[in-house]
Amino acid sequence: MIISTMNELPGYEIEEVFGEVFGLTVRSRNIGSQFGAAFKSLAGGELKGMTKMLADGREHATARLTEEAEAKGANAVIAFRFDTSELGSTWTEICAYGTAVRARKA
């Protein structure tokens, strides 16, 4: 599966457009990481547990997007993006989205 943030794929021809696809995951921070993050934010610096949670969430959302694109018959996703939002004080929604297409080498 080719995944690109561009609207076109250099060296490829778009043969068919299947439409929008997305992968969604909602992650919850555990109570320990919340307290750790609160203390760390006082001193400053990277919140490694939070960074890992978001990176894992992006991978999971991308895997779901890929599954949906493949189910539609696509071999590529163009205009790929991520969107992240907070749901309440402990949940984070991560959405990967783009346009599923069938592309072939030009």
Image: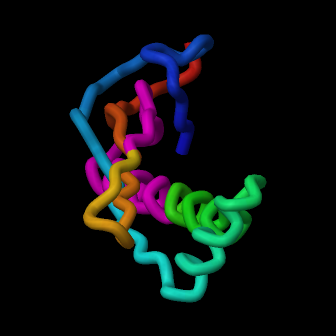
Find residue 94 and report its horizontal and vertical position in percent: 39, 55
Q: Can you see residue 70?
A: no
In this picture, residue 8 sits left or right of residue 72: right
Q: Can you see residue 45?
A: yes
In this picture, residue 11 sits left or right of residue 70: right
Query: Which residue is rendered at x = 54% and y = 45% of the image?
Result: 1
Camera-side residue of 36 and 83: 36
Residue stretch rendered in magenta on the structure:
60-83
Camera-side residue of 69 and 63: 63
Residue 98 versus residue 96 in the image, above or below? above
Find residue 63 and report its horizontal and vertical position in percent: 48, 60
Query: Which residue is rendered at x = 44% and y = 53% of the image?
Result: 66
Q: Quadrant of the C terminus?
A: top right
Find residue 102 and report its horizontal and vertical position in percent: 39, 32
Q: Is residue 86 magenta?
A: no
Q: Across the whole image, how many numbered discs are drawn on residues?
A: 0
Camera-side residue of 79 and 51: 51
Query: Which residue is rendered at x = 77% and y = 54% of the image?
Result: 45
Q: Residue furthest left?
A: 19
Residue 85 versus residue 11 in the image, above or below? below
Query: Which residue is rendered at x = 35% and y = 59% of the image?
Result: 93
Camera-side residue of 68 and 53: 53
Q: Residue furthest front?
A: 42
In this picture, residue 72 sits left or right of residue 3: left
Q: Is residue 63 magenta?
A: yes
Find residue 35 and report its horizontal and vertical position in percent: 57, 80
Q: How is the image coloured?
A: rainbow
